[in-house]
Amino acid sequence: MPLSPVRPGAVYFSLLGPLSAVIDGRPLPLGPRKQRLVLATLLSRPNAPVPVDVLTDVVWPEGPPRTARKNLQVYVSAARALFGTVDGDDRGRVVHDCGGYRLRVEEGELDTLRFRTLARAGRAAGERGDLRTAARLLREALDLWGERPPLHDLRDSAGVAEEAERLEARCLTVYEDWAEAEIETGRASVAVDGLRDLVERHPFRERLRAAWMNSLHQTGCQAEALAVYDDYRQLLARELGLEPSPAMAGLYRALLGEGRASVPRKATGATSLPADARHFTGRVDELARLVEVSGGPDGAVVVVSGPAGVGKSALAVRAAHLLADRFPDGRVHVRARREDGAARTRNDMLDELGRLCGVAGPARPDPARAEDSWQDWLSRHRALIVLDDVADEASVRGLLPRSGRCAVLLTARGQLAGLEAVHRTALAAPGEDEALELLATLIGGDRLRTDPDAALRIVRACGGLPLAVAVSGMRLGVLRHLPLAEYADRLGAPAGALDELVAGDVSVRARLAAGWRDLGVRDRTALARIAALAGDGRFTLERAMEALGRDERETIRAVESLIDSGAVTSPSGEVTAHAALYEVPPLLCLYARENAGPGEGGALEPALPPGDGVSRLVSRG
């Protein structure tokens, strides 16, 4: 994927080192420290609205002064004036948007956007088997990094430090991708020294160690390669009481016995997985975390939750395909619902799991004995179980391992808050750049580039939801004559937007309807009333109180019940109920307005009882 060149006279921002900006090679003064903190935060979320509360926490982590909002306005005005001297008065670099500020920046104007584009292009080349191109593109991405850590001059602000750590984590992943590509092409010598330095700084990162072992082996340092594994084994035992993963142990045995580092450990058990999504894009961080947690040596139970169409199933299936070498006793996928959307019983799913995994159950139907047989099988095997679209906790409790080294991936619309000792990954709609990348894979990059503004309107009308973007792409793929701008206009009309999001037998409205049916009466009523007042889906506690006609305590309980159900998303960091900006996904907002029944637009009666509030609300793929 080619990068947009920096135009003569255009500003170029850098976060991969100290915060800086240049124009035609000349440094651009960015003002005092607090103004640079604001700019760094806006640049870390390019082309996306950043709430005022987030900016306030970054600039004044110890507590804002009474004049905080006015001071922020001053910093933003100064930034606008600064950019006005570069862009001219009509550019509108910094705009007020959704209760915050958005900094508009093009791909060729920000090093983190260039880094992301190069990294994705490199990974795509690697997946096609073009490893030389992959190595070149990934190296170009890494060369964007400065000699010092990202944003090191502003890291005393917790918010900036958190973003810098995320950038460093992405860099590590790209470095691993690059090193592996170079090793596969027989150029391990270029990666050896860098891998040694990174392993010293990140001693528990297994993938780095494996690449270092492979590179040492390829350059003729067999004894050193084996010593790397032995050091790692001792470190894990001493610090964590763990053993290296089966994949790492398999690599060691390959080096020790055959000297062939590329021999993977093949799974020998049952495999019953859906096909990996052809057009899977983005989710790099979420996928890496899911693979790391699920593929750990002791097994795990992981809940992937999120609103309808956000891509939970696609993410879980992709992770399961990538974990083939970690689970020699099989990887199986079981749907937790019937075709009509109704929840399957635990016994029904237990029967299917038994058939897929070859579990010897009782001769006569006996749910208790069947569950015991299943638990016994789990305790003696190393398998990955994917339970997809789980309705509630009760339907899966007897299916989760009580001991042993098996892992279970659960996808669910709701949070499944009643499950203990689980890892949780909550998915939100991806950013606009990932949504555009998905659309481009379906309609072609050339067609998208004919009208990028219309393409952006399409993904925004879809709320960035992968299912909706995928349906739009499939529909446009068939209607080749349809201009993107015309389709964007159709989606922009609320009355007909959901009618446009249908491709063959794939319907966004049908997915939303399944989640709507799962909601209890109180949750449906609350959601309908909030959707009626929240124009773009975003709302505050005060706005919800107005919509529901309830006091603060009852409103908080109602909103938290909707969060549990997956119908409302909340901020990812800690924030008080009054300061939080909640959101109903835009397409769900449209559906709720369409389907509010009699009484669901009126007052909430009866009042919510204390402690009430756990329900449920699919994914692409």
Image (cartoon, rainbow, N blue to C red):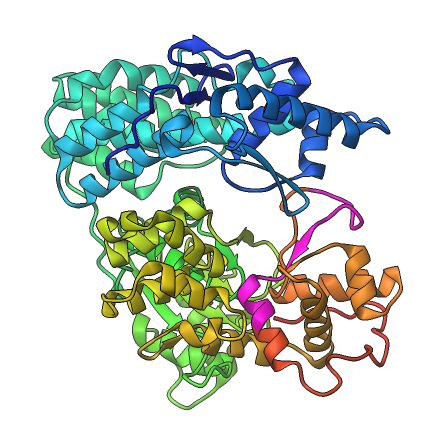
> Quadrant where the C terminus lies?
bottom left
Q: Residue at x 44, y 36 (%)?
A: 242
Instruction: Residue 477 in the image: state x and y as whole percent.
Output: 25, 65
Query: Does the magenta run of residues contain 146?
Result: no
Regarding residue 144, the answer to whether it shows in the image is: yes
Observer-nearest residue: 327 or 100? 100
In the image: residue 206, left or right of residue 101: left
> Quadrant where the N terminus lies?
top left
Query: Does the magenta run of residues contain 577?
Result: yes
Instruction: Residue 73 in the image: state x and y as whole percent.
Output: 72, 29
Observer-nearest residue: 70 or 56? 70
The answer to whether residue 246 is above or below residue 457 is above
In the image: residue 379, left or right of residue 56: left
The answer to whether residue 616 is above or below residue 316 is below
User: Which portion, as a residue range, is magenta?
Assistant: 574-590
Residue that protrudes farthest toward the top in the picture: 26
Q: Residue at x 81, y 56 (%)?
A: 542
Instruction: Residue 142 in the image: state x and y as whole percent.
Output: 32, 23
Instruction: Residue 554 in the image: state x and y as whole percent.
Output: 85, 65
